[in-house]
Image: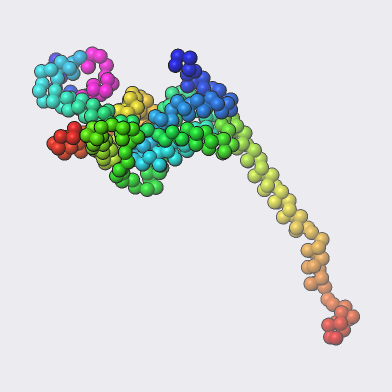
Amino acid sequence: MDNEPPDSELVRRAKSKELTAFEELIKRHSQALFAFMYRILGDSAEAEELTQETWVRAWKGLGNFKERSEFKTWLFRIGMNLALNLKTRRKVTEELTEFLPGEEKKEPARVYQQTQKEKVIRDALAQLPVDQRTAIVLLIYERMRYKEIAEVMGKSVRAVDSLLVRAKRRLKELLLPAREKGVI
Amino acid sequence: MKMKCQKVKKLLSRTLDGEIEAGLKEKIHSHIDGCPECRKEFEELEALKKFLSSASVPEMSPYLLTRTIARLKEAKVLPISGWQVLVWRVVAVVLIVIGIGVGVLLGLGIGSNGEVNGELAALNSEPSIEELFAIGK
């Protein structure tokens, strides 16, 4: 792992039109990018399609990446804009019934419990306004600092703080029924 | 001076996310220790974060990487640098100017074209006697 070149080096090589360096970046960040898109869009087919599209845009626009932020931050910003455009075109109401890969290998009782929990979380996230959802997804699942979230979202750190406060307050309200039912 | 609940509550989210300077963090925790209401709110936020974090990671299709790389190769696109964009813009402007110039010149050329003028002259000229007889036949 230590021998792996940092993103900055791969970016430099990719800027010199070295596709293999860019392929390495694709391998490194696609899973995180897909998970992010999935949590924003709530649909795995659309998340995959937009993950691919994000990479194509990133490759085309790599020359304009000034490296003032991390490559991943820049990449997620492209992805977020694509997801927001798609959501503007169609008002999403995510009602997912998909099982996440790997669940079928677990014991039935645990599968059921985990599936219920996943559903509760997805439904609660889906009810947040998209900017609050994006901020909370980046915080919880990408473990980004407020500054990084601000960079991805093109907002100030103060605005991100405010979004997160509102998102958490709303999630507490939304998750209360599940809490009473004992899912949480 | 002790911090007031209202102020502490506003900072609980940031405190939990580790987005607060050490000195202030210490003051907030000192307040939380002695205030059941603020402590309850902090613990609820902690529990929420823990619960949300427990969701499994949505896994992408194993074919996504292959498809993405294939799509890039099919598209045959190459990264365009900032200066290339500038060059393309300059080229586009030059081509537009040339296009307009050629259009103007062609327009002028039509205006001075012999054939067109000849046709106009024929329309304006009076027919000869032979031509009038020919029409009469």
Q: Residue at x 52, y 33 (%)?
A: B69
Name the residue: 68% across, 47% down.
B99
- Residue A71 shown left or right of residue B85 in the figure: left
Look at the image and name its color scheme: rainbow
Q: Which of B120 and B68 lies nearest the eye of the viewer?
A: B68
In this figure, what is the number of numbered marks? 0
Most distant residue in the right direction: B130
Answer whether residue B13 is magenta in the image: yes
Using residue A59 as the reference point, say whether residue B102 is left or right of it: right
Q: Which residue is drawn at 23% across and 26% down?
A: B50
Q: Is residue A164 magenta?
A: no
Q: Which stretch did the figure color magenta?
A: B9-25
Query: Majority secondary structure of the magenta segment?
Result: helix
The answer to which of A3 and B110 lies nearer the viewer is: A3
Q: Give the image location of residue B70, x and y in percent.
A: 53, 36
One can see residue A54 in this view: no
Query: Is A12 located above or below residue B85 in the figure?
Result: above
Q: Is residue A163 left or right of residue A85?
A: left
Q: Residue A111's spot in the image, x, y percent?
A: 25, 34
**Is A23 in front, or is A168?**
A23
Report the quarter where the C terminus of chain A lies. top left
Could you tell me if residue B23 is visible in this image?
yes
For the point 34% across and 47% down, the residue is A91
Residue A69 appears left or right of A116: right
Looking at the rendering, in which quadrant would you find the N terminus of chain A?
top left
User: Quarter of the image holding residue B85?
Assistant: top right
Residue A169: x %, y % from top left: 21, 33
Q: Residue A44: which quarter of the image? A: top left
Q: Residue furthest bottom?
A: B137
> Where's residue A165, x and y in %?
24, 31
